[in-house]
Amino acid sequence: MAQQRNFSQWQNIIETHQQSGLSITQFCKQHRLTLSSFYKWRKIITESAKDPAISASMSL
């Protein structure tokens, strides 16, 4: 069964990737993430940085 992650967990994952120096593909393989989920959540998190209302609604 796939693990359900929330907004703050994905924020942490995206930050960890940025600090890792790995390609997205390598990072996702090492952390057993699908590329589609990574890209989807990276987009959500990037957009939330532009509009704080998005992150507030995702935290509920």
Image (cartoon, rainbow, N blue to C red):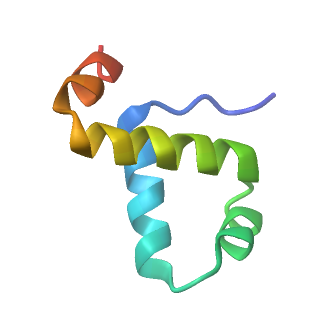
Q: Residue at x 47, y 56 (%)?
A: 13
Q: Residue at x 60, y 82 (%)?
A: 22
Q: Quadrant of residue 37?
A: top right
Residue extending farthest bottom: 21
Residue 3 is situated, as x and y percent measured from the top left of the image, at: 67, 33
Q: Is residue 27 left or right of residue 11?
A: right
Question: Quick check: 7 above or below 42?
Answer: above
Question: Quick check: 19 above or below 60?
Answer: below
Q: Is residue 4 left or right of residue 53?
A: right
Q: Residue at x 62, y 50 (%)?
A: 38
Q: Is residue 35 left or right of residue 50?
A: right
Q: Quadrant of residue 6?
A: top left
Residue 36 is situated, as x and y percent measured from the top left of the image, at: 73, 45
Residue extending farthest left: 52
The tally of labels here is 0
Q: Residue at x 70, y 62 (%)?
A: 28
Question: Quick check: 21 above or below 28?
Answer: below
Location of the C terminus by quadrant is: top left
Location of the N terminus by quadrant is: top right
Q: Quadrant of residue 9?
A: top left
Residue 23 is situated, as x and y percent measured from the top left of the image, at: 65, 79
Residue 39 is situated, as x and y percent measured from the top left of the image, at: 61, 50
